[in-house]
Image: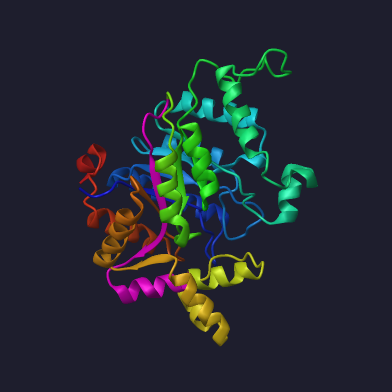
Amino acid sequence: MAVPLSILDLSPVSSGSTASDALRNSVALAQLADRLGYVRYWLAEHHNTPGIASSAPEILIGHLARETSRIRVGSGGIMLPNHAPLKVAETFRLLEALHPGRIDLGIGRAPGTDRVTAMALRRSPEALGAADFPEQLAELFAFVSGGFPDGHPFQRVTATPSDVPLPPVWLLGSSDYSARLAAANGLGFAFAHHINPAGAVAALRGYRDGFEPSAELPRPAAILTASVVCAETDAEAEHLASSLDLVLLRLRRGQFDRFPSPAEAAAYPYTPAEREQVLAFRGMRVVGDPATVRARLDALVDATGADEVMVTTMVHDHAARLRSFELLADAFGLGASPASERAA
């Protein structure tokens, strides 16, 4: 039986297009994923990045949940140090009230931006670290469960609406830190293979070995997030993937431009050192035709023991991105929803 598939969307803004175009593309992709049988659709949080339109995932979650009928919609993730825990708890209880049983709260501790923008978000240089992340997480849960001790200044504060459960919480990470924290708190864990492929096996193994059952999650639940480009042929997939090569190279220099086309990437004068970097980037991604992609993802699942694979696909052309997810769904035998079957 094939592993379930989900989607992580950053709402990329392609060159020659606008952020509004990118957000409309996200709606179309979420609706396609809903029809094809993907399990979840998560939105990222990034700031001060012209090439990414997803700066407020909580807003996109509500909109996409309304525009779909079955798929779970959530955050991949809300960067908790950027927000007051009470506000996050109230926002996601409200989303759960509007779309019962279809919301996920994925939480990360990275800023999702550069250091200066992080200071603008957090309002204090002292808040730039994430050392107090476990305390922030505990505070979020306390606003929901009434878990503040006697005498605590927040003891009488409850996240409203108070008669709605907090959606399932997942911790996100690219190291073993969040893996250990998720395990200790009995939470789901999503590992960013596309950021740190070498650390995936150890982090997911440590998560399973250290997992402590909770009332919300009696057994470990692990998602592996992978960067994937799937096309009709290996050659076409490699051509589409060249855009992200240039994006990642620019990011290393602190350049946050719109997402380039393959033609723009081909025209870029790579130095020999930059071409070496591009080869290293390619090793972090799964690129190829459906058979190639299926084989590589199956191997990753076998190695990590992941329960689910969450795919992020960053290409310039919207139609090519839709087609990549269609080919992937077919390769893994995803079941279409009743709505799509009626429309067929």
Quarter of the figure with residue 141: top right
Q: Please name the residue shown 34% across and 74% down the image.
A: 236
Which of the pair 328/198 is nearer the observer?
A: 198
Q: Position of residue 28 (x, y in %)?
A: 40, 49
Report the side of 213 relative to 288 (left or right).
right
Q: Position of residue 112 (x, y in %)?
A: 62, 51
Residue 40: tell me if it is visible. Answer: yes
Residue 83 in the image: above or below residue 190:
above
Q: Please name the residue shown 40% across and 46% down the image.
A: 223
Residue 161: tell me if it is visible. Answer: no
Report the side of 231 relative to 80 (left or right).
left
Q: Position of residue 259 (x, y in %)?
A: 54, 66
Instruction: Examine the structure image and report whether residue 315 is included in the region drawn in magenta.
Output: no
Q: Position of residue 314 (x, y in %)?
A: 46, 61
Instruction: Examine the structure image and report whether residue 241 is included in the region drawn in magenta.
Output: yes
Q: Which residues are magenta?
A: 216-243
Which of the pair 62/113 is nearer the observer?
A: 113
Q: Please name the residue shown 50% across and 35% down the image.
A: 184
